Image (tube, rainbow, N blue to C red):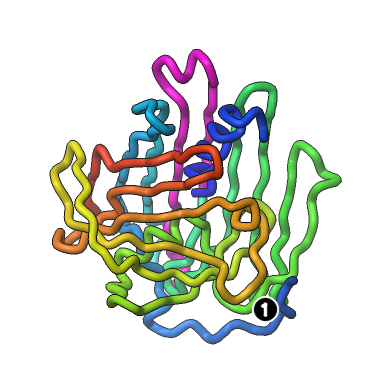
Amino acid sequence: MRLAFALLFALAGAAAGQAGESAPTPGPTPGPEAVYKGLRDGETLTYSVRWGIIPSVGRIKISAERLGTGANSVLKVTTVTGTWGLARGLFKFDGVGESIYQLSTGRLLSASETTEYRDRHIKNSISFDYDARIATYTDFLHPKNSKQLKMPPGEPADLILALIQTRDWNLPAGGSRDALVIFEDQFYPLTIRPESTPDVVYTSLGTFRTTILVPRMEKNPPIGMFRRGSTVRVWIATEDPRHLPVRFEVAFRFGAGTATLIDYRGPK
C-alpha cells in the first residue's frame, strides 16, 4: 500500500524536479479489538489520481484476498498503481505492492513493492519479528541498503492501510488515536485526529458526507515526509454504512496529489 503514496511522491518529484527514535519495548498482547480491520475479503477500491489542476493522471487499485483457514489465515492486500493517458506519455509509472496481515492478531507480517518510473527501479520488502521487535528491510536491487530496524512500541501498519482502518474507528470530534506507520524503511509514530468541520465529497459513485482525518507526528520530532512539510488527509464517509474512504490527499509545499474513489466492489 506504500505504492499509493509512492505514485503521489513520484509525481511530486517530477513536478518539483526531484526537488529521535524510541527505545524498542514489547508491544501489548493483541486482544479481540486488534484483529485486522480496514479491508474485507474480496473488497476492491479503485481511485483516480489528480495532480494539482490536472485531472486523472493515474489509477490506484487496492484489493483484499483472504488466504488460508483458521488461525493461520492471512489477508493479502494488493495495490496496483500507474499513470495513464497523456500523463503516462510524459511520466510512466508502474507499481505493484503486497501487504500480508495475520487475521487472528491484526498484525502486519510483511510488505513488498516493485516500482518502475523513469530510469528508477525499486524492489524491496520488509518483514517483522514481533518477539524480537526487529524489522528486516531488504533492498533486492541495492543489497547494501538492506538493514535491520528496531521497532518502536506499537503495531506497525502500511500508511494507506492505517488510514483505511480509520473507517472502523468512528472517532468523535476532539478525539484521537495513535498509529505506528511504516513507510519504506522508516517508522512514523502518528496521532490521527478528525477535523472539526465535515466535508461533502462528490464522486462518480455518489455524494458522500465525510469526516476528514489527519495524521500528524505530535509525540516525536517530525521525520521524513512530515519534516519536509508534507501533510496527509483521508475523507471517510460517515453516513454511508460502508464508511468508505472516498478520498486521500498528500499535500506538498508546491502542490497536492488527490486520489478519489471511482469504483468499489464489496466483500464476499
45 versus 103 height, above or below:
above
Residue 135 location (% of width, % of height) = 70, 64
Residue found 41% across the figure and 47% down from its top: 249
State the residue in front, 163 or 77: 163
Asked whether residue 168 appears in the rendered view, the answer is: yes
When asked about the image quadrant of residue 204, the answer is top left
Asked whether residue 74 appears in the rendered view, the answer is: no
Residue 103 location (% of width, % of height) = 42, 68
Start and end of the magenta stretch? 71-98
The residue tagged with tag 1: helix, strand or loop? loop
Q: Which residue is denoted by mark 1 in the rendering?
A: 131
| Residue 93 is inside the magenta segment | yes
| Residue 205 is inside the magenta segment | no
Residue 2 location (% of width, % of height) = 53, 48
State the residue in front, 181 or 112: 181
Q: Does residue 243 appear to the left or right of 255 in the view shown?
A: left
